[in-house]
Image (spheres, grey):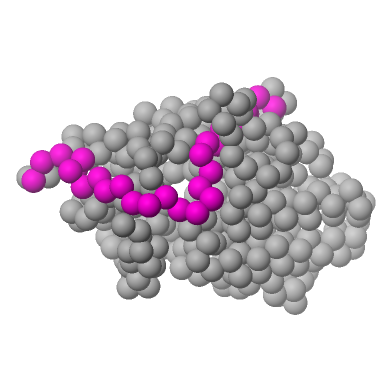
């Protein structure tokens, strides 16, 4: 028995693979193209672990997917692979359409053919799990209730539109062809191994380097924050016990404004790695808001709590302290992933904003 994980060298995917192999002996077939955010160094602990089989490849490569399914006969596919940064989708949406839509379609078709060829026992035990985002639901007003699994899809960025499309494909392959699927829509993840273009690792890296901490607009955009290990635990529970065809919203019950996130990170850095120049708060710089920036996301996670008995183990206070400590203890990891290409991206994205 084995599972096939796509995008398993990225932020959430690598955390999932590490947690999976720490808790079970079931092998992981890890398929990742190793684009800018995919990093095998995330999986260095598994370098000599025969249970981890890494293949560098593209989810749009149908012959490759077919070969992997035929050779390893996985009992499940956990689909993380995606372009996932809203700002990048604004600057270059074509990659998001290819990976998130065409790639998901390719995987679904390969999975359908593979599943159809299994014996009755194999067909009954197979599952395709699709990892998605709360951004497909659009934006909430301040007093609106959180998103539920029945909320309307109203994506507002090229990224969220591409993920909404992939969600619809997964649903259609289940209802049309009977492919056994589950989908999860998660809130903002944070924790170890997150690429330093996202808010929390960007604030940590820039603060330690004495660089400006860019805050979009007034910084009052609200997100629900979920520690990545809690997300991985939810995915394992869905894979083991989730209802065929069901969607589960996964959130941390932590609605916090971006400017307050930055404040908490700064407070921890001031405590754990104080600067001779004074509080890192001096580096906060407000920049012009990005186009179509959703004002608020919030997840109602009662369904997964009631059906599958999952709840996040971390509060934001415990999770953010673990996260800051991890980045302080892994400065070399940050330095190695922040390549020249990454610095050029940061300059392109933020340099145009007064």
Q: Is 173 covered by the magenta stretch?
A: no
Instruction: Using residue 281 as the reference point, say whether residue 218 is left or right of it.
Output: right
Instruction: Using residue 15 as the reference point, say whether residue 155 is left or right of it.
Output: right
Q: Quadrant of residue 67?
A: bottom right
The secondary structure making up most of the magenta span is: loop
Q: Is 286 covered by the magenta stretch?
A: yes
**Viewer-closest of 217 and 124:** 217
Q: Quadrant of residue 44?
A: bottom left
Q: Quick check: can you spot residue 133?
A: no
Can you say whether 320 is above or below 142 in the image?
below
**Viewer-closest of 139 and 256:** 139
Picture residue at 22% right of the left edge, 55% below the top: 211
Please state, as top left, top right, bottom left or bottom right, where the N terminus lies in the image. bottom right
| Residue 55 % position (x, y) | 59, 70
| Residue 179 % position (x, y) | 85, 52
**The magenta segment:** 277-303
Instruction: Using residue 192 as the reference point, say whether residue 62 is left or right of it.
Output: right
**Viewer-closest of 92 and 43:** 92
Q: Quadrant of residue 251?
A: top right
**Viewer-closest of 93 and 305:** 93
| Residue 200 % position (x, y) | 37, 46
| Residue 84 % position (x, y) | 55, 56
Q: Quick check: can you spot residue 264?
A: yes
Picture residue at 85% right of the left edge, 60% below the top: 112
Can you say whether 155 is above or below 307 in the image?
below
């Amino acid at each position: 028995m084995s599972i096939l994980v796509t995008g398993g060298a990225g932020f959430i995917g690598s955390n999932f693979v590490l947690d999976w192999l720490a808790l079970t002996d079931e092998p992981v077939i890890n398929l990742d193209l190793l684009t800018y955010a995919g990093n095998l160094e995330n999986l260095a602990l598994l370098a000599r672990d025969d249970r981890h089989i890494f293949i560098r490849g593209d989810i749009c490569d149908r012959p490759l997917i077919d070969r992997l399914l035929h050779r390893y006969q996985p009992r499940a596919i956990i689909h993380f692979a995606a372009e996932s940064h809203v700002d990048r989708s604004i600057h270059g949406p074509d990659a998001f359409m290819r990976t998130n839509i065409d790639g998901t379609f390719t995987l679904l078709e390969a999975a359908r053919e593979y599943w159809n060829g299994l014996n009755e026992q194999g067909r009954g035990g197979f599952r395709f799990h699709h990892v998605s985002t709360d951004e497909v639901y659009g934006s909430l007003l301040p007093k609106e209730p959180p998103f539920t699994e029945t909320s309307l899809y109203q994506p507002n960025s090229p990224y969220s539109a591409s993920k909404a499309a992939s969600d619809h494909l997964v649903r259609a392959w289940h209802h049309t062809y009977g492919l056994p699927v589950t989908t999860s829509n998660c809130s903002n993840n944070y924790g170890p191994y997150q690429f330093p273009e996202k808010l929390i690792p960007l604030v940590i890296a820039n603060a330690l380097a004495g660089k400006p901490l860019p805050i979009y607009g007034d910084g009052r955009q609200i997100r629900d924050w979920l520690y990545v290990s809690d997300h991985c635990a939810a995915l394992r529970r869905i894979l083991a016990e989730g209802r065929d065809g069901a969607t589960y919203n996964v959130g941390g019950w932590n609605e916090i404004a971006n400017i307050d996130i930055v404040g908490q990170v700064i407070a921890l850095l001031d405590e754990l790695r104080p600067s001779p120049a004074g509080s890192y708060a001096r580096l906060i710089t407000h920049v012009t808001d990005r186009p179509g920036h959703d004002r608020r996301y919030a997840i109602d996670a009662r369904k997964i709590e009631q059906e599958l008995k999952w709840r996040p183990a971390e509060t934001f206070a415990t999770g953010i302290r673990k996260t800051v400590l991890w980045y302080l203890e892994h400065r070399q990891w940050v330095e190695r992933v922040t390549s020249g290409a990454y610095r050029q991206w940061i300059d392109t994205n933020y340099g145009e904003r007064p």
